[in-house]
Amino acid sequence: QVQLVESGGGLVQAGGSLRLSCAASGSIFSFNAMGWYRQAPGRQRELVAEITSGAGTRYVDSVKGRFTISRDNAKNTVYLQMNSLKPEDTAVYYCIAQTDFADYWGQGTQVTVSS
């Protein structure tokens, strides 16, 4: 059973930075892709950023140029560096790991950006 543990959320002022971490219980080489979703109150969960096993990346338009997703294969960890944070980035952020057979989710970490 794959376990994903997120950390790094918190409260930050607008314009600030946070780095989220997602540590997997197994080798991240086994995943086709890993990524971060977020869900704000009253809104649908949306994909924020994704990184494939080949290190290809994609981002939702609203975070391009501000967020960077990366992976450390030796640590089985994926990161989301978030810069120039805005109040509209406030949400619970979830890590996801995708295989051919299933998607695995972390428990979520709260990010709150104050204006």
Image (cartoon, rainbow, N blue to C red):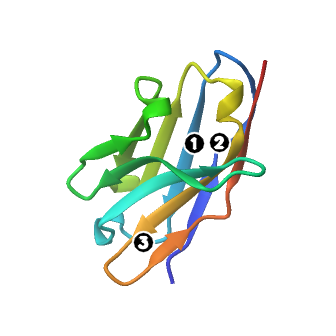
Identify the amino acid type marked 3: Gly
Instruction: Give the left or right position of residue 5, taking residue 23 as reference.
Output: right
Which numbered circle lies on residue 20?
A: 1
Please tell me which residue lies in front, 51 or 46: 46
Element class at badge 3: loop
Which numbered circle lies on residue 38?
A: none
Mark 3 vs mark 1, CA separation in Å: 19 Å
Earlier sequence position, callout 2 versus callout 3: 2
Residue 16's image quarter?
Answer: top right
Earlier sequence position, callout 3 versus callout 1: 1
Q: Mark 3 Cα within 10 Å, few/some/many (few <14, many 20+)? A: some
Element class at badge 1: strand
Element class at badge 2: loop
User: From the viewer's perspective, is the residue at label 2 or at label 3 nearer?
Assistant: 2
85 in relation to 106, above or below: above
Please tell me which residue lies in front, 17 or 36: 36
Percent across and percent down for residue 95 are 54, 57
Question: Do the CB atoms of the residues marked 2 and 3 lie less than 8 Å apart?
Answer: no
Identify the amino acid type marked 2: Gly
